[in-house]
Each structure stands twice: as C-alpha cells, then as structure tokens.
Amino acid sequence: MTAVQAEVSERTRIVDATYQCLAARPGGISVTDILTAAGLSTRAFYRHFESKDSLLLALFRQDGERVFAELRAATAAAGSPREAMEAWIRGFLELTAHTRRRRRVTLLNSPEVVRAEGYPAEHARVMTEHEAAIAEILREGHADGSFPAAKPETDARLILAVVSEAFTDRMSRPTAISAAKAAELVTDFAFRALGAEPS
C-alpha cells in the first residue's frame, strides 16, 4: 500500500467510525470514541482533521456536495425548465425515500453536528447554492415562457422553503405521504404560483 493509499484508508476509517459513533451515541461523541471505533491513533486523526468539529463539518459538506451534484446532473439532463424544476423537486424529496440516505440525513442533522462550530455558516452556504440553482431554472423558464409569472430570486427562496418543509415532514412522518406524492404536490403548487400551463 502506498503512502497515499494509506492516508485515504485512514481517512475512510475515521469517517466510517464517525457515522457509527453518531448512530450509537446520539447524545454526543468524542475524538476518543471515534478513534476507538476506527482503531487508530490520535496522530492519525490530526493528520486529517483539525478538530472534531472540522470533521463533522467535512462530513456535512461532503454529503451536501454529493446531493447538489446529483440534483444538478438531473436538471442538466432535463429537456426544458419545466422538466428541470420537476427533476429538482423530485430528486430532493426522493432523498427521504431511501433507508440509507434517510439515516445519513438524520445523523448529519443530529444535535452533535448542529452544535459544531461553523455549522450555521455551512448550512447557509448549502441552502444558498440550492436557491441559486432554482433561480437559474426559473430565469430560463421565465425567458422561454414556461414560467411567465416567475420572479426568479424571490420565488427560488420560497420554493426552497416549501420543498424544505415537505422534506422535514417526510423525515418526521415517512408513512404519511410518499416521496413521489409529496413531490407531485409541491411541483403542482410551484407551477401554479409560477403561472405555468397545466400538464
């Protein structure tokens, strides 16, 4: 194993151990807990992360970037702004439909992660990225007439708020309504607000 491979392996073990600890100790975890689970030394930890908080933020950022990349790919593959908006809403809410991803979302929004220094700024950055992506779709839709009533910047913020609320509802009450149905309802609401023609 090369030195680079060894470093990647160490980091992966730390990350995997952190998720295990977050799941096992929802009340709080320590660097010692993580290193015990990973079977690594303190030196190994600080080769990769400055602190527990920097580790937790790195996990939050990594997962957020993965989700954002998936949603961008889905909207880029869409044939129209209307299809792109549908894809974004559906993709965001489908995160709640898969057991592994639901668990990951729960862990990354646990009190331990939310308490991490820098979390509010990181969370705000993620939401700003999503808002900008929605605004881009709305601008294209307004330009081609798909969304004649759209006010891209304002409406992007409101659509993100509605989708986020639907996401939170799905996370707390997964059996109340399916992810597909939630996406359908949110999409219908958004399209009516944007002045889109009925399907």
Image (cartoon, helix red, strand yellow):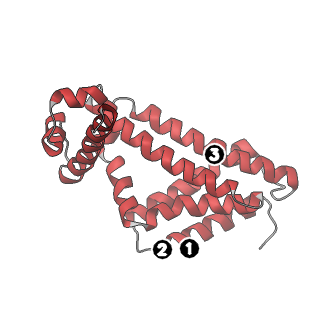
> Which residue is label 3 attached to?
157
Q: Between marks 3 and 1, how big is the CA–CA gap?
A: 22 Å
Name the image quarter holding residue 10. Answer: top left
Circles 2, 1 touching at the beta carbon (< 8 Å): yes
- The type of residue carrying mark 3 is Arg
Task: Tell me where residue 114 appears, x and y as whole percent.
Answer: 34, 40
Please indicate, yes or no, whether residue 109 appears anywhere in the rendered image.
no
Mark 2 or 3, nearer chain start:
3
Left or right placement of residue 74 versus residue 40 in this view: right
Left or right placement of residue 102 versus residue 186 in this view: left
Task: Tell me where residue 144 appears, x and y as whole percent.
Answer: 87, 54
> Which residue is label 1 attached to?
181
Please indicate, yes or no, whether residue 154 appears anywhere in the rendered image.
yes
* Residue appearing at x 43%, y 34% in the figure: 120
Name the image quarter holding residue 149. Answer: bottom right
Badge 2 local density, few (<14 within 10 Å), some, or many (20+)? few
* Residue appearing at x 25%, y 41% in the figure: 14
Q: Secondary structure at mark 2?
A: loop
Q: Secondary structure at mark 1?
A: helix
